[in-house]
Amino acid sequence: MFSLPSAFIFAVSVVSVSTGTFISPAADSTISSSGTFNFTWVSSRYFEESSQSISVLLQPSANFPATLEGIVLAKNLAPISIGVGEEGPTYYAQLTPEFVAESSQTGEFAMIVIEDFTAFGGNAAMSVEYEMITLA
């Protein structure tokens, strides 16, 4: 009887290919390192899956994608509207990068979305999506 290592099965059942769209900020755009910006992201989960929440991180591009560490901009955001496929659920927030001791950083960053969702069959799962932006 053939069996897979449990770590492999866990990785397959928990992490999936991401299926979302960044609306704002757009990829390769420049945002203020100290100001508030509009964040809008649309999950493209279909009827067998249900988006639950997202967390948003900023990570300097030098460290990405080696790790998923960074400045937490939002944690466990709930969708503001429901939908299916390319037209829903939508997440929106006014976000502000906050650096320690007001030492703002500039340069290229990865904006990372970690989506928690319920997969087919009711299994808990997550996906990771990112885009590159510039902080100035």
Image: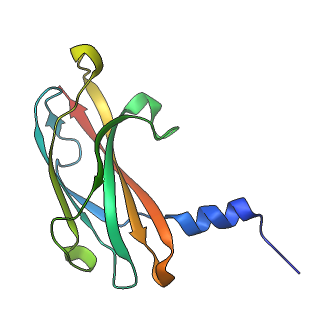
Please give the count of numbered marks on the rendered protein. Answer: 0
- Residue beneath the point at 18% across and 49% down: 26
Q: Nearer the viewer, residue 71 or 78?
A: 78
- Residue beneath the point at 43% across and 60% down: 127
On screen, residue 128 versus residue 45, left or right, reads: right
Across and down, in percent, residue 12 comes to 60, 66
On screen, residue 1 versus residue 60, left or right, reads: right
Q: Nearer the viewer, residue 125 or 88?
A: 125
Tell which residue pokes out farthest to the right in this image: 1
Q: Quadrant of the C terminus?
A: top left
- Residue beneath the point at 51% across and 38% down: 67
* Position of 92 relative to 44 (above/below): above
Give the quadrant of residue 44: bottom left
On screen, residue 7 versus residue 99, left or right, reads: right
- Residue beneath the point at 15% across and 70% down: 81
Color scheme of the displayed model: rainbow
Give the quadrant of residue 104: top left
Across and down, in percent, residue 86 comes to 24, 75
Q: Quadrant of the N terminus?
A: bottom right
* Position of 106 relative to 70 (above/below): above
Across and down, in percent, residue 89 comes to 23, 71
Across and down, in percent, residue 17 comes to 46, 65
* Position of 1 relative to 33 (above/below): below
* Position of 81 relative to 26 (above/below): below
